[in-house]
Image: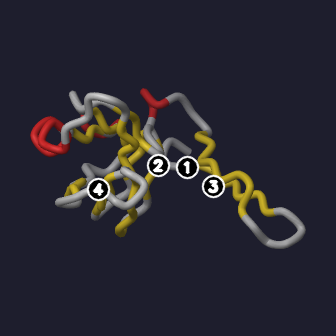
Amino acid sequence: ANGTMLHAVVKDSAGAVVNNNFLPFTAPKNFALPKANVQFTVAKSANADGSVDITVITDKVAVYLTFTTLAQGRFSDNAFVMLPGTQKIQFLPIQGFLISDLTSSLRAEHAASYM
């Protein structure tokens, strides 16, 4: 079962997702993971609220996909499981943020990168 994870989605009575988690059945060192090709693009400018969209694409499942940057701020989601396809996350800047720091230093890593 070293390729098996449980995808647990909990919804409230109105059908809104209140919890969405992937639960592994083994320790990460025992995973048999595909070598996912993760790519991302950073929006050229910030949204009205100051956040910056990052579009992420992967061809295979990417387990514990983690983004790092030298830019000042945090990500809306990080260290997550991404299924094949496209999704958007946001970078939420704090004082001292420069979009050039984000675009020049953004990195993505995932568990299969180290196996």
Q: Which residue is mark 4?
A: 46
C-alpha span from label 4 to label 3: 32 Å
Q: Which residue is mark 1?
A: 4
Give whichever of discs 1 and 2 has the lower sequence position: 1
Kind of residue sitting beneath label 2: Val
C-alpha span from label 1 to label 3: 10 Å
Q: Report the residue at 25% width, 49% height from top.
A: 35
Number of the front mark, 1 or 3 = 3
Q: Is residue 61 left or right of residue 113?
A: right
C-alpha span from label 2 to label 4: 25 Å
Number of the front mark, 4 or 3 = 4
Residue 31, placed above or below residue 8:
above
Give whichever of discs 4 and 3 has the lower sequence position: 3
Q: Which residue is mark 3?
A: 7
Q: Residues within 10 Å of mark 1 (few under 14, many from 20)?
A: some
Observer-nearest residue: 4 or 41?
41
Q: Is residue 99 left or right of residue 46?
A: left
Observer-nearest residue: 50 or 28?
50
Label number found at residue 81: 2
Question: Does residue 114 show up?
Answer: no
